[in-house]
Image: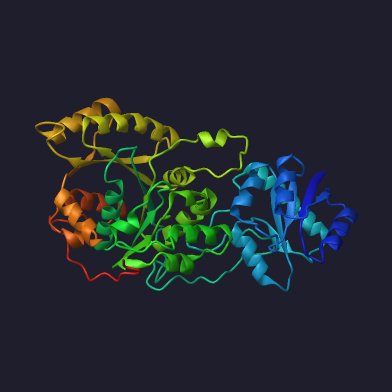
Amino acid sequence: MIEVLTALPGQSWEGELVARLERGAGGVRVVRRCVDLPDLLAVAAAGIGDAVIVSAGLRRLDREALGQLAASGVAVVGLWPADDPEAERTLLALGVRHVLPAEAPSEQVAALVQSAVLAQQEDPRGPAEPRRDGQLGDYHLGGPHDPDDTAPAGGRGDGPAQEPGRVVAVWGPVGAPGRSTVAVTLASEAARLGAESLLVDADPYGGVVSQLLGLLDEAPGLAAAARLAGSGGLDLPSLARVAPEVETRLRVLTGIPRAQRWPELRPSALEEVFALSRSLAALTVVDTGFCLETDEEISFDVAAPRRNGATLTAIEQADTVVAVCAADAVGVQRFVRALGELREVVPGTDLRVVVNRVRRGPVGARPERQLADALERYAGVTDAVFVADDRDGVDAALLQGRTLAEAAAGSPVRPPLRALAAELAGVAAPTGRRGRAGRPRRRAGAA
């Protein structure tokens, strides 16, 4: 017998549904009628119930709550009034895998509950991930769902179907200099090579992408996208709205302006943001934090927010991780130690190493050769990308709030990162040393 919870506050048909289930012979039994979401989460965490029936009207129901229910081993079934198709779309957008009209026969509801419990046992991931074409998955009973197939103007949805874009996480240990500059330059160079690009600032400690590009950050784009994803309201048009185009083919999701706002970057919501970004851009470059620790998960409250959840989610969802190493003895030592931790978090990931600010001062003669030997000997890295130290060019870009291509087109920083951007975006590698001037940027919210 499957034990079922209900969380249908304010639904006039809840009593009738429970009575029909009790009279039916579908192998299910209602054991608790929860009054709100906190009550439901507490009951599920206590190990009561195999499945829960919810409605779109359950206050504060979001992807994070669905993830907590999945972690408690409780399958979720969504019911919606037949005269309210918007409720069905909301449930599907949240990632509820099994939905059905509330007026369906009790036998059909019981069968759906059994299917949901079986699916939960086979795949306990929680909310369904959105399809990479930006549409919702076909999870409801009774035929395929056919949502509006539109994409934002100028996005990758125009014309024939395209391959999903790639997600690249730019990471470096504490003290790795220029991680954000590397991320901005990779995204900018990919855009100038013709690839639709999206730059995401997901650093929960001190994101500076908006400052580097001279943008206002009163309304951080990533936090807004995460809120929409958590409530089931994120789609391609809304993602495009919160990620304005600041340069031709380059969109930006700015980060949180204050570090104490890190709880807004929920991992379950960011997973959906990154999944949809594959449809919005050919290359998504994510500037992450430095810390990979997961000690907060050991706390007594296993459902508590994780400060490093945004960084870990970006790295886990990425197709390639670009690891930034400082070009000095201290930086290499920190990098070698942290690289082992990174490989534990994402074993087997596609890894590219960028050695930043290469100069003779802290290394000696032939710095690239010495750094390459050290990385090969202590970290097994044989294909690092070396980026010269160009303080004047980087300072000019920071002063103007522009990319290197705009502020210092001849900077020696650009050629190696431009070649890496071409590789990551899957476009033709550049042949010249100087970047193209490009069309004037269409800046949104310039400071």
Across and down, in percent, residue 291 comes to: 41, 39
Residue occupying image coordinates x 24% and y 62%: 192
304 with respect to 325 (left or right): right
Across and down, in percent, residue 370 comes to: 16, 30
342 with respect to 406 (left or right): right
Q: How many marks?
A: 0
Classify residue 87 by image quadrant. Answer: bottom right
Q: Is residue 385 above or below residue 278?
A: above
Q: Is residue 337 above or below residue 147?
A: above
Residue occupying image coordinates x 18% and y 50%: 413
Quarter of the figure that contains the C terminus: bottom left
According to the image, what is the colour scheme of the structure?
Answer: rainbow
The single residue placed furthest to the left in the displayed view is 365
Q: Is residue 366 visible?
A: yes
Quarter of the figure that contains the N terminus: top right
Residue toward you, 139 or 375:
375
Q: Is residue 304 above or below residue 442?
A: above
Across and down, in percent, residue 180 comes to: 31, 50
Residue toward you, 342 or 255:
255
Across and down, in percent, residue 324 comes to: 29, 41
414 with respect to 167 (left or right): left
Residue occupying image coordinates x 26% and y 69%: 441
Q: Is residue 412 visible?
A: no
Residue occupying image coordinates x 41% and y 46%: 205
